[in-house]
Image (cartoon, helix red, strand yellow):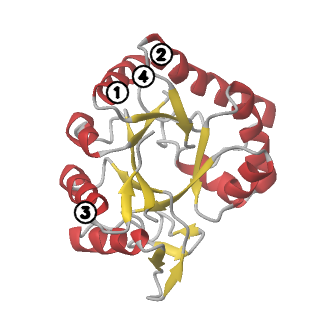
Amino acid sequence: MKHVIDLNCDLGETHPSLLSNYDADIMPYLSSCNIACGSHAGSEDQIRKTLDLAISNQVAIGAHPSYDDWENFGRVSINVPIAKLQQQIIEQVELVKSIAESKGGRLHHVKPHGALYHDMAKNKQFAYELLEVIKRIDPTLIIYGLSGSEMIIAAKELELSYFQEGFADRAYDQATQLRSRNLDHAVLTLESDVIDQVNLLLSQKVKLKNGSQVPISVDTICLHSDTEGATQLAKWIHQLITTKANVDLYHS
């Protein structure tokens, strides 16, 4: 039986630190996308534009909520009361959901962004409290979370569907831990390194920073849109997935 793999990308992330927006170029190679909800990047106008691209390319639509932290692009953990954070997550997810439905689309999944993603990956109780409100919005939403992480465990306990995620362009310190962006060589910048990593992920393995290879469960592979050469990389990764004998590209 073939293993089905989704290819996702974080899009709609208009921000001063990004020189260009390549969403239209990348979208045709994806099977799902995660749309910034305006708290770390993006805007309601950008959400609408990205949704139009996703719908026209038949790409599954995801909300990409974050800490309310435009200044740091959502990449810094923030100590915020859980009730306030839950409300922020509800507002962000419902914004993308409502706009998608107004255009005849539907929200397929939720993938937290940046520091929120990693905090949920490390702390099951924290993840549970936030996934609980996502379930209230729509219990059929799929949760995208770091493979083997506490977020995946929390999703299982809440009986939510989930995709275990691997990263095409990020280095791993452990099977369940990406290398911090504050450290050297956290982002894979060489095309050959990205392609090698994807080939391993398609074989349900990943290479750690220490050089060892370990098993990993992967349902979806993420490529970041601000990685250098992302459009060409998306094209190559799409080709790898669609031509590998034992793998099929996901279709929602």
Distance CA(mark 1)–CA(mark 2): 11 Å
Q: Which residue is mark 2?
A: 99
Q: Which mark is in front, 4 or 2?
A: 2
Q: Is residue 102 above or below residue 110?
A: above
**In front: 12, or 185?**
12
Earlier sequence position, callout 3 versus callout 4: 4
Name the residue carrying label 4: 43
- Which dot marks residue 243? 3
Chain-order first, disc 1 or disc 3: 1
Q: Are marks 1 and 2 in contact (CB under 8 Å)?
A: no
Q: Which residue does the image show at 24% across and 70% down from the upper left?
A: 190
Question: Label 1 crowding class (10 Å Cα cut-off): few <14, some 14-19, many 20+?
Answer: many
State which tag comes first along the sequence, 1 or 4.
4
Mark 3 and mark 2: Cα distance apart in space: 35 Å
Residue highlighted by disc 1: 50
Q: Which residue is at the front of the view, 172 or 163?
A: 163
User: Label 3: how many residues lie within 10 Å, few (<14), some (14-19) or many (20+)?
Assistant: few
The residue type indicated by label 4 comes to Ser
Q: What is the C-alpha distance between the residues marked 4 and 2?
A: 12 Å
Q: Where in the figure is residue 170, as x and y percent of width and height?
A: 41, 65
115 or 25: nearer the viewer: 25
**Label whose residue precedes the other's in the sequence (3 or 2):** 2
**Tag 3, which secondary structure?**
helix
Given contact means CB atoms under 8 Å apart, are the residues at marks 1 and 4 in contact?
no
Query: In the image, which disc is placed on residue 166?
Result: none
Q: Residue at x 28, y 39 (%)?
A: 27
Quadrant in which the C terminus is drawn:
top left
Q: Give the CA distance from mark 3 to mark 4.
A: 36 Å
